[in-house]
Image (cartoon, rainbow, N blue to C red):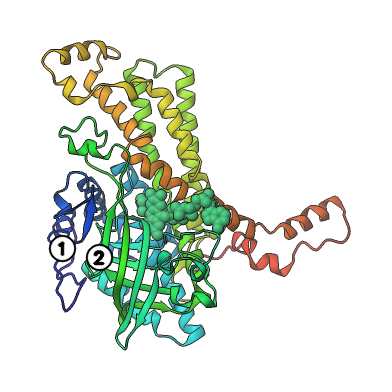
Amino acid sequence: MPDTAENPGQIKSTIRTGQEYIDSLRGRNLKIFLFGERVDEPVDHPMIRPSINAVAATYDLAVSNPELATAMSPYTGERINRFLHIAQSRDDVVNQNKMQRRLGQLTGTCFQRCVGMDAFNSLHSVTFEIDEAHGTPYHQRFLDFVTLAQSGGCVIGGAMTDVKGDRSKPPHAQADPDLYVHVTRRTEEGVYISGAKAHQTGCINSHWLIVMPTIRLGEQDRDYAIVGAIPVDAEGITYIYGRQSCDTRSMEGGDLDAGNAQYGGQEAMVIFKDVFIPNERIFMDGEYDFAAMLVERFTCYHRRSYVCKSGVGDVLIGAAAAIADYNGVEKASHIRDKLVEMTHQNETIYSTGIASSYQSTKMKSGVYKCDDMIANVCKHHVTKMPYELARLAQDLAGGLMVTAPSQQDFEHEEIGPLLQKFLKGREGASTEDRLRILRLIENMTLGRNAVGYLTESMHGAGSPQAQRVQIARQSQLEYKKKLAKKLAGVGAADTESPTAQEEYMARVFNVESGD
Ligand SMILES: Cc1cc2nc3c(=O)[nH]c(=O)nc-3n(C[C@H](O)[C@H](O)[C@H](O)COP(=O)(O)OP(=O)(O)OC[C@H]3O[C@@H](n4cnc5c(N)ncnc54)[C@H](O)[C@@H]3O)c2cc1C
Ligand code: SF4
């Protein structure tokens, strides 16, 4: 990326295409470790490149389908990539989900840009409300940064999850203060931070990172209440690349055994050692009482962003149907029923995510925010349903999915023809095609893209219990008890309690247009 020492993180011209994006990542001299060694140029690393290709797809979709993947920015006055857009209407929030499903279909993996998109949209309202309460200048600073990122067409990584040490203790009570990212020093010009963020999706493929607190904070955690934008190539940052199951297959040459040779996800640990954030890039510093609001609003957007998994699920359903066809059993009733079950579960994920977006409301700052209750229901489904889809896909695949020989064996002069003969499915289906589909199912349910499709579905945007807590908070049992008691004739129940109508049900029964 064309950085300068005076102006780190600046992009000289707007990145529009996938190729321009890939070029923007070259020559940044990031301190990245993988297999105990420094990576000179991640763009050319065969294990890292599929994750870069997945982000590049978000640019190419904006070129090929601008209605779906771009929006008009009120800040730049130009069409920008939707991943950088601040939602101006209910439709904007809905269209985020449509774009995410489409990208899941096109890549079969995590395309990494939603964390930044959701951080942008949540910070819009949170910075506004901090300023309102404390008279701080965060909202305008944030808008200036949004404008800069939109003008450059940047990728923004959302760095929320700290390494957290002893989960039962708050940040200030940890044995080591660095287990949560915190301010170590303040100067007239800005702050210095230290600590580490774990599991950072697409961080090395980003241009900027936004660091945010990961949990509710108390007064003693004041130094942990820090939100700021940092260029990915800032001094003091070390990236340690995360391994994914079967990741080295992409370093073996050939494209069959990788299953999905073109696309993959990326996670890394990001270690900050006295990294400087100038004042103009600080969007919260010390307002610990707003940390919980930020976490809740971010996860609200992000939990319904997991409709991305319905796009990936479309690919898995297609793979399951294709292998049943190659095996000659596509018309068997139990196969058809299993494909229906997969589709039913996949559409359930999509339905809840898109419903949350359709039930968006306008915040005080003007941004639209999706419905919290249904976003949590969506993400909670996502912690379960992809596992069931994976189970059914493996059922339809048969055992060869995990016992098939390597591409080199298929290409071998002596044993290749034997494998072609003995691993054939129905007449008319090629052995190689059958193998390719099996490897794709392996990739998505056991291999590198199972990271995104399964375990990220479990823990990304918060582990299952985090959603249950949010669902419980909004379940309005007292209000519902009154409904039941009234119909049952128990006492003189009041069904229209004002508190009930102020909360979840008020949104359900709101018939106003969101635009
Ligand atoms: C593939 C992937 C990509 C991700 N991408 C990002 C990203 O881009 N940015 C980002 O910021 N984060 C990201 N995350 C992080 C994600 O949000 C966390 O994994 C999630 O919040 C869980 O945290 P953890 O992994 O530390 O698990 P833990 O917190 O260790 O949780 C493990 C278990 O312990 C339970 N538990 C934890 N704390 C408590 C407690 N105090 N009391 C009782 N039970 C507890 C949990 O419910 C869970 O069952 C990603 C995660 C994954 C797996
Ligand atoms: S898991 Fe889905 S929502 Fe999260 S960044 Fe990846 S593609 Fe986007």
Q: Position of residue 88 (x, y in %)?
A: 40, 68
Q: Residue at x 17, y 34 (%)?
A: 252
Identity of the residue furthest to the front in this view? 175
Q: Is residue 70 above or below residue 347?
A: below
Residue under numbered circle 1: 28
Question: In this orientation, which residue lies closer to the viewer: 413 or 193?
Answer: 193
| Residue at 17%, 53% in the rendered image | 39
The residue type indicated by label 1 comes to Arg
Measured as percent of width and height from the top left, residue 96 is found at 38, 56
Q: Eyeballing the image, is 311 above or below 129?
A: above
Q: Are marks 2 and 1 in contact (CB under 8 Å)?
A: yes
Counting residues from the start of the chain, the first of labels 2 and 1 encountered is: 1
The residue singled out by tag 2 in the image is 232
Check disc 1 and report its element: helix, strand or loop: loop
Crowding at dot 1, Cα within 10 Å, few <14 / some 14-19 / many 20+, comes out as: some
At label 2, counting other C-alpha atoms closer than 10 Å, the crowd grade (few under 14, some 14-19, many 20 or more) is many
Label of residue 138 in the image: none
Q: Which of these two is toward me, 164 or 9?
A: 164
Classify mark 2 as within 8 Å of ligand 1 or not, answering yes or no.
no
Q: Quadrant of residue 365?
A: bottom left
Q: Is residue 201 visible?
A: yes
Q: Mark 2 falls on what kind of element?
A: loop
Q: Who's the residue at 48% across and 77% down the image?
A: 222
349 to the left or right of 67: right
The answer to which of 138 and 362 lies nearer the viewer is 138
Residue 474: x, y in percent?
A: 63, 59
Residue 25 place in picture, x, y as percent: 17, 59
Asked whether residue 87 is in view, the answer is no
* Residue at the image position 77 percent from the left and 55 percent from the top: 481
